[in-house]
Amino acid sequence: MQPGSDPTRRIPDPTRRFDGAGPGSNGPATERIAPAGGPGAVLGGRYRLEGLLGAGGMADVFRAEDLRLHRPVAVKVFRPGTDPDGERRFAEEARTLAGLRHPGLVAVHDYAVEHGRAYLVMELVDGPTLAQELTREPYDAESAARVGLELAQVLAYVHGEGVVHRDVKPSNVLVDHDGRMRLADFGIARLVGNSGMTSADLDVGTVAYLAPEQVRGEPVGPPADVYALGLLLLEAIRGRRVYDGDDWAAAEQRLDRRPPIPADLPEPLRGTLRAMTDPDLRRRPDARQVAARLSAPAVEPEPEPERRGSRGLLIGLGLLAVLAVVVFALTRGGDEQTDVSAQPATSTVETTEAAPTEDAAEPTADGGGGSGISIPDIPTAIPDLPDIDIPTAIPDIPEVPEGAVDDARNAWERFTDWLGQFF
């Protein structure tokens, strides 16, 4: 990364020089770390600086040679702070970082303060950053899950040691020659924050990866690293940042909004990403839980996720149609029952009124009743109707299977995420 190429810094100009010249000056880049020296300078009588590897808002990183052990190292030289107790705090934090041992960390070998400038001597990892890797092509779901597992294991270890990174992002992840992810600059934000460097020289994190609690200025702990790791993995899958805004106003607009997550990701990756990026830090899993989830076997998506989604939609519509038919049948059944019960009452009345006329038409015993008028027989009953089973009570509703509610919620979230891709 070229000095000043990252626009998402909280400070206004991370490339400013100590001689007062701006970033467009033609002066040598080594002036940015005066008076500690530039390439060719020897720090502590042991570390000879050879070239600038990168620069940020609070420090410059150099490739160097350890003249005592004859090995290449990386030296991070910090800009001066304003805390009078800063050197003591720096020493405490540096000792903590130097005591961290994990294959996914960039190890800290040494530290010192020279000419009022603090510096860390670290393991040199020859390899690109994850940010550089992603400029070539995005990662597939399997590769992203592997990256997430490795980095979550690192975070679980250091969080257990009481250290918080505060600036997890692709440019702080190095890819070594074995393809392993190595988390760099670990603990530096905490280290500098504790040494009082909270002025414009302090890079407190990249806005595009800040957790909601960081944006609100609340105390920052391990959940902020988990949130940033979730955004990092989404960027690895999408090939671009989830949030492009480089100012605090843009960050504040997403405080209570989840980032969109591709609906075709397999589980447990998709559900884990959703939990990691929950705006509420209390609902986020810790790094150890993230590692455990991502180490579970993946449930591969069907070959055509879109068709699967369409089939799910059709099934849902079919269920709605069945429900509508049942409701209609129950309603119609009630109406028919009412009509049938009303008909016999009407027929009874008619039969009662016709009875005297029928009796008058019949001949009497003395033979004087014949009048020659023929009255047709009036039916006295309605023919039997076939038996119809009309439910009179609501059937028992079976218990909801365990996990069905979560499945329904996940299905709804997939649907809303899918819609979110178009808005």
Image (tube, helix red, strand yellow):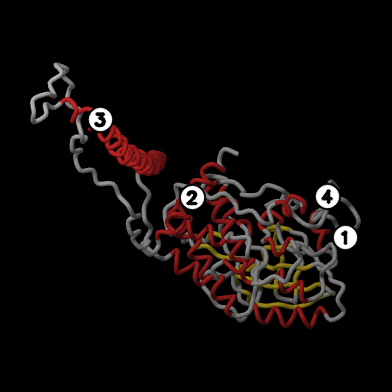
* Residue nearest the viewer, comparing 347 with 338: 347
- Residue 23: which numbered mark, if any? 4
Q: Which residue is mark 3?
A: 354
Amino acid type of disc 2? Trp
Left or right of 171? Residue 19 is right
Residue 154, given in percent of the width and then of the height, sits at: 54, 70
Disc 2, SS: helix
Label located before the other in sequence (2 or 1): 1
Closer to viewer: mark 1 or mark 3: 3
Whole-percent x and y of residue 330? 35, 44
Q: CA distance from mark 2 to mark 4?
A: 50 Å
Q: Are marks 2 and 1 in contact (CB under 8 Å)?
A: no
Q: Which quarter of the rendering shows the C terminus?
A: top right
Where is 147 relative to 352, above or below? below
Please name which of the two marks, 3 or 4, marks the residue nearer to the observer. 3
**Crowding near the residue tagged with mark 3, few <14, some 14–19, many ≥20 C-alpha atoms within 10 Å:** few
Pointers 1 and 3 in contact (C-beta within 8 Å): no
Quarter holding residue 173: bottom right
Could you say which disc has been placed on residue 191 in the image?
Answer: none
Residue sitting at x 59%, y 78%: 100
Mark 2 or 4: in front is 2
Question: Relative to the observer, which residue lies in front, 254 or 78?
Answer: 254
Q: Which residue is mark 1?
A: 18
On screen, residue 163 versus residue 203, left or right, reads left
Measured Cα–Cα span from mark 3 to mark 2 = 67 Å
- Residues at marks 2 and 4 touching, judged by CB atoms closer than 8 Å: no
Q: CA distance from mark 3 to mark 4?
A: 113 Å
Q: Position of residue 47 (x, y in %)?
A: 70, 72
Between 170 and 114, the residue placed more toward the observer is: 170
Query: Mark 4 or mark 2, which is nearer the start of the sequence?
Result: 4
Q: Which residue is mark 2?
A: 412
